[in-house]
Image (cartoon, rainbow, N blue to C red):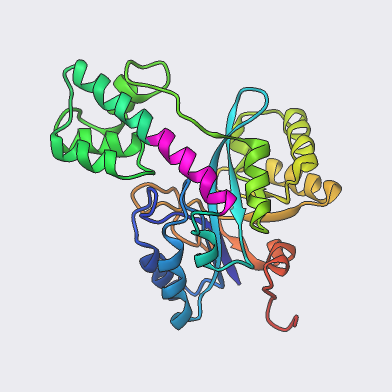
Amino acid sequence: MLVDLHVHSTASDGEHTPAELVEISNRKGLSVLGMCDHDTMGGLPGAAKAAGPLGVRLVLGIELSIDLRDGGTSHLLGYFPHSSPRELVDPQNELQKALAMVQDGRRERNRKILVRLSSLGVGLSPGSIERIESKPVLGRPHIAKAMLREGLVSSEKEAFERYLARERPAYFERKRLSVDRSIGVIRSQNGLPVLAHPGLLGKSHRELRALVESLVDDGLAGLEVYYPTHSAELRDFLLTMCEELDLMVTGGTDYHGNRMSSVPLGGEESGFHVDAKDVERFLAACGLTLPGKG
């Protein structure tokens, strides 16, 4: 049984709508799908509506951009297996209040980038500016796509290398949630906080161990062990750490669409994929069991 606990829809920066992701998952025979859009839960109602008739077991989630205590940044996954989409998108809950701050920060940074690009002679058309400013979770990748579409650069890579990457002339920092607040707001909705793709942090095993131990004290529930770019050595190290620190194991493709992802939705039997048996404890915490086990 294959599962994919980390995918993105067009609610943030994915290629497919929430309903399309559910339909593709159903055709591929995936057992469980976890939808974790960046800094928004707007796609969850549509995904849940599509999942019901198809019998797809959907785990509601989110991926938060966070500030670490050492000055670095990372991503934190939040899973909400016992909440309804309606509960999660209620603007009065603590999670949505935190997301409103993050989304305001995205808008503010986008405005700064657009003004700077204009001053550099590569300003976008009014239509593109209006679209970017009206969406709460669009960011630099979407600006790069618009620049390419309007012929201002020859590729999205060029847009970043010349203008949008860190230390380039149109780069600006944006507001993120602190790691302790992120864990707190996920826990406030009875969610499970999971550190996303630890291997992308560029830390040594010793540094990763110290970071994870500090996050366990804050309420971290698990690690995304199975990830397309994690080496076998790193995966084994993370598995050992999960066992020693009593953390749950998750995994996923981080699928944004065929154009933007290294592996397809659900992975490949002959390549990267996540077996349900390898994340069984996490699935049990979500109220999901393997066939023949309850």
**Residue 170 occupies quadrant:** top left
Q: Name the image quarter holding the N terminus.
A: bottom right
Q: Residue furthest front?
A: 92
Q: Residue furthest right?
A: 244
Can residue 234 be seen in the rendering of this structure?
Answer: yes
Q: Is residue 26 left or right of residue 197?
A: left
29 w.r.t. 142: above or below: below
Q: Name the image quarter holding the C terminus.
A: bottom right
Percent x, y of residue 61: 55, 57
Q: Please tell me whether the stretch drawn in magenta is mainly helix, strand or loop.
A: helix
Residue under the point 33% across and 31% down: 110
Q: Nearer the viewer, residue 232 or 98?
A: 98
Residue under the point 53% across and 52% down: 62
Residue under the point 43% across and 33% down: 105
163 w.r.t. 51: above or below: above
Query: Which span is picked out in magenta?
Result: 93-106
Percent x, y of residue 249: 71, 55
Percent x, y of residue 126: 14, 35
The reply to whether the magenta stretch includes residue 103 is: yes
Percent x, y of residue 10: 35, 54
Q: Nearer the viewer, residue 118 or 7?
A: 118
The reply to whether the magenta stretch includes residue 98 is: yes
Can residue 231 be seen in the rendering of this structure?
Answer: no
